[in-house]
Amino acid sequence: MQSHATEEQIRAVCDRIEALGFKAHPIPGAVRTAIGITGNTGAVDIGSLESMAGVGECIPVSKPYKLVSRDIKEENTVVRIPTPSGEVTFGGAAVAMVAGPCAIESREQAFTVAEQVKAAGARLFRGGAYKPRTSPYSFQGMGEPGLKILAEVRDKFGMGIVTEAIDNESLELVEKYADVIQIGARNMQNFSLLKVAGRSRKPVLLKRGMSATLDEFLMAAEYIMSEGNYNVILCERGVRTFSDHTRNTLDLSMIPAVQRRSHLPIVVDPSHGTGRRAKVLPLSRAAVAVGADGLLVEVHHDPDRALSDGMQSILPEEFAALTEECRQIAAVLHRTLN
Amino acid sequence: MQSHATEEQIRAVCDRIEALGFKAHPIPGAVRTAIGITGNTGAVDIGSLESMAGVGECIPVSKPYKLVSRDIKEENTVVRIPTPSGEVTFGGAAVAMVAGPCAIESREQAFTVAEQVKAAGARLFRGGAYKPRTSPYSFQGMGEPGLKILAEVRDKFGMGIVTEAIDNESLELVEKYADVIQIGARNMQNFSLLKVAGRSRKPVLLKRGMSATLDEFLMAAEYIMSEGNYNVILCERGVRTFSDHTRNTLDLSMIPAVQRRSHLPIVVDPSHGTGRRAKVLPLSRAAVAVGADGLLVEVHHDPDRALSDGMQSILPEEFAALTEECRQIAAVLHRTLN
Amino acid sequence: MQSHATEEQIRAVCDRIEALGFKAHPIPGAVRTAIGITGNTGAVDIGSLESMAGVGECIPVSKPYKLVSRDIKEENTVVRIPTPSGEVTFGGAAVAMVAGPCAIESREQAFTVAEQVKAAGARLFRGGAYKPRTSPYSFQGMGEPGLKILAEVRDKFGMGIVTEAIDNESLELVEKYADVIQIGARNMQNFSLLKVAGRSRKPVLLKRGMSATLDEFLMAAEYIMSEGNYNVILCERGVRTFSDHTRNTLDLSMIPAVQRRSHLPIVVDPSHGTGRRAKVLPLSRAAVAVGADGLLVEVHHDPDRALSDGMQSILPEEFAALTEECRQIAAVLHRTLN
Amino acid sequence: MQSHATEEQIRAVCDRIEALGFKAHPIPGAVRTAIGITGNTGAVDIGSLESMAGVGECIPVSKPYKLVSRDIKEENTVVRIPTPSGEVTFGGAAVAMVAGPCAIESREQAFTVAEQVKAAGARLFRGGAYKPRTSPYSFQGMGEPGLKILAEVRDKFGMGIVTEAIDNESLELVEKYADVIQIGARNMQNFSLLKVAGRSRKPVLLKRGMSATLDEFLMAAEYIMSEGNYNVILCERGVRTFSDHTRNTLDLSMIPAVQRRSHLPIVVDPSHGTGRRAKVLPLSRAAVAVGADGLLVEVHHDPDRALSDGMQSILPEEFAALTEECRQIAAVLHRTLN
């Protein structure tokens, strides 16, 4: 309440709170009176209160998410991805490496990259068949033929497949061919798509939106979980800020922040997170050091000719070196790579 | 190129540019050599160049959009909305007022608000039947029954209807019942939805994404136009910044910026743009003063009990006062309200 | 408190609060217990609490400023600037126009611009003698000779002078020659300089820092007022965001936000706020429409040859047109220009 | 140039460029003509060009800094701090640990913390005698008596001293008592202070401003170097973004970005960078992993009673654990701690 709020105004606000079905707790202070609200099961719509006479400000204090919260489930969720060559986990002792090209361009390209990232130790393969591109005139991905190539990669190299769905139609196909359904940053608040993903039985890798807060990120995961799919892997991939020396500003503090609030695993995408090839290696090391449960790295054997995002893809041999350095850093945290 | 780049490195970069099918223009300077690239019809993927030896930085200079650009069409696009009580235009001499509740909650609520905003002069009615909400536990809109109420509002009050579609399914229904299809900020880069909207014959009101640049905003419109729908109305509704005294930071400079680059009309949503009832009136005046082609204002006869966004809705009588002030400001710019 | 906090943990937190000299108000809720803190005269350092066992989050609710607040002084402060041609006010019914070049370059330049902006109706002249420039190799201002030229402008044209001080030394000189001491955005949290300005008897125009929140902006004014100088004029000049179509993002919602919390006048600088000549006019109109108490506009008779910020300076004839449009918009708000 | 620019307009722009003393390089493209500018020794003020008829946009491509650049000096600068117990370096093979309380509060407090951080291996001690605080009513530091305590810490524990100067007066004293002069984030563009620091013979630790770009950060260092002081240590301490789960968003990509452009060493402040005690350890590990040349960590033996920033200070035993983990991560990068 404002400092000059009258007794009547305070009482009116309390009455309104009670009328809304909540409990009001007026706390008189030296200068002004605060009023606590409890009894709410979700968020209170504060509009009706903030505009009342004498009210200074309304400040929400309880968190709106439930299923994603450590309040509900204290121990870490371990998401298990069965692959032809054994299970890969997110959220356990091992740090999961997911590698592959930004977009699937051809069987030859996919096989070449898969062979090399597998040799470096990766057991999960990434690559987009559906590409959300800023321009309608840019390469939009191969679609279902790309998914079929990914399925061939799984068969031939024994790797699990992570690939993005961009709408309800593509999600159905991705679910059929892949092991993990990726929801991209631009779709983090495509609630319609999140609900469909929540009804899938495949794990979902959810990327943080370009300007999503911690709460919004967790609420997006809550959308998926509230439909019954509890296998959600979160992914920090950089946010949009004024800072212009990288494509996005990788926010590594998100990892311990998520781990404090939620039981879900969280991985880092240093490729989109920086947008610059030369920064992928140092920020991958940093991501493992901060405690991430995995990395999502763009690798291309010929990045200069990549149909998308070549600028941020590293070479297979660079990926092998990255894996080795990350393995050593993981060891400092008593973790392995898988 | 870097200042110590060798002749060979410069030549190699030029060769690569030519190999990619473009034309290279080396320009030697006092300290370093710059190389211009022309002949590209779209954006050049600069990854292949930036990582070459001797290269300092790659800087794109041409704009990737075409159909939205004033380079293609110099005069303003006027989007015409036929309503039972005559045509309303966006982009002409008149400033269009769109008013109504955030969400359709009942026939009674919709009729009450519609009657009052109509009396204040509005000829377009807004109200959501599908609501993208951060929490899965918040009211998600009435769906098709809400659209039917909107259709009744059109019949009864002679107003045109503006309402949001959130996925391909709802878009089909919105197209059937409404006069303008709204695409919300969270879906500005839901390219799948934009393409479907681009195949509609109804005008599309496209809101700026929460962290969209001018270029991305125009490219999203380009997605719609590239599918054949040229009736696109842009909408500034605030962006996300560190600034915490309003829900979003309304970026009114976007209006002259869009008007310089594009022929499309642009309106302002001061309700989402500020998130605070007390700021809707001053920022509505400012929006008209800066040159916006219309306003999208949330009005509710009982905002304290609104099921969503009551905090930013104004009362019908406040809307009437707002309309009157905006009319006077429009007159200073030799415009009318419609 | 966290939802699984024990009674002991809650009691321990209350004890700590009391030990710190405050009063603790535990409020048990359905899911968790909140604890209100009162009795504090300033901000509580919440570090000691947030790290205690069972604590979920600490949220400050009372505002740390006093003298700038409407809680202390309900009516508007009117800052009065005596000029040779009569008093100019900030915060009263009239909107004050301050115009002039970014930097004082020569007597001839200053006189030429002063004559023309005076003819357009401005009674306050701005122009920098000390220029904070990003590069040490850019023109840094004329220094005291520039101030002397400003004093001549006052004598010759009867205008009041607004000019920037960048450190304690220049502040002493600015105080001697000028009518209003400007503190630039980069120095908004140069607390040492603010204190010195607070001991001056000349009014201070304080620009918002590039990434300052409302609270920080008001606290900077509080620094000046706490030293005894109550004549503070605030100035919104755009903030730094991801948005790249203007140099800064002009945050016009700051004007009603300041006016709600504080009794101090607030003006707008549309020149720095946009950084683009073509946007100065529309955003000046918007600033007056939103309710600003004045405008600070860069005007140069030959902007293409200006030694700094020519890109955002308008021509004298453009300023005359701007003044006329702003006068009409001010009239809609029942205000005049002065 | 715009796509419909005429030959005359192109020629006029070239003429203007030449008239400004530069060389113009028109490059005709498929759709539009670009014009390169060379021969400039500093930045071109693009205002005069951008407003000419037919001009589409002006894009600066060359960097305005010189002395900080790797173009001038290819090998790393190693800043050497002589301490009573031997030299500590920034920018060499060793990672430097700087630890101590946010503010010096008493001899007892300083000695207690110094003893413990020294035992953990730190050889540089930090602690503020001058504190820039948002509120004028917060503890502002002990001033010179605090500096004298720091000098005693040096004598008693053999540690080098790093402490902040906030204006010309305090800088003179800091120079007298300390080994490294710290310039805080709020003063990064206090150019007057930077110049004075540039005339000091003591090394300067320059913190990145809250919303400073890479270029602005390097230009601030250029101010110091241009006055003759080449011993500059840069410090990333988080930037201001919309992200609200930490006090600032630590931008670790700044470290490889600086290292690519500049020869200067760069350290990380994870305490201000996160503002949360629980995040200091994981982000310290990440900072060393990304390649930082040192850490600046706030340590307090009784953070709950600290007079400032207790919330982000860690305990001495936590610092010892942090040091040990960082040592192991440094080893992966073939570095030691010093």
Image (cartoon, coloured by chain):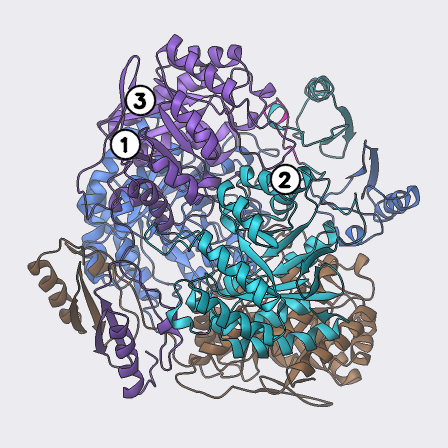
Chain colours: A blue, B brown, C cyan, D purple
Q: Quadrant of the C terminus of chain D?
A: top left
The reply to the same-chain question for discs 1 and 2 is no
Q: Which residues are magenta?
A: C49-59
Residue type indicated by callout 2:
Arg
Query: Can marks 1 and 3 be said to lie on one chain?
Result: no
- Which of the pair C216/D330 is nearer the observer? C216
Quarter residue D281 falls in:
top left
- Report how far apart the C-alphas of labels 1 and 3 lie in the structure: 16 Å
Q: Position of residue C180 (x, y in %)?
A: 61, 54
Q: CA distance from mark 2 to mark 3?
A: 50 Å
Amino acid type indicated by mark 3: Arg
Where, by quadrant of the figure, is residue A30 drawn?
Answer: top right
Of circles 1 and 3, which is in front?
3
Residue C25 appears anywhere in the view = yes
- From this viewpoint, which residue is outermost toward the left? B8
Which circle marks residue D327 in the picture? 3
- Residues at discs 2 and 3 in contact (Cβ within 8 Å): no
Question: Which disc is residue D230 wearing?
Answer: none
Q: Could you tell me which secondary element the residue under label 3 belongs to?
A: helix
Counting other residues with Cα less than 10 Å from the Cα at mark 3, is it few (<14), some (14-19), or many (20 or more)?
many
Q: Quadrant of residue C162?
A: bottom right
Q: Is residue D264 magenta?
A: no
Question: Which residue is at the front of the view, A141 or D115?
Answer: D115
Q: Is residue C57 magenta?
A: yes
Q: Is the residue C32 above or below the residue B276 in the image?
A: above
Question: Magenta-highlighted stretch: main secondary structure?
Answer: loop
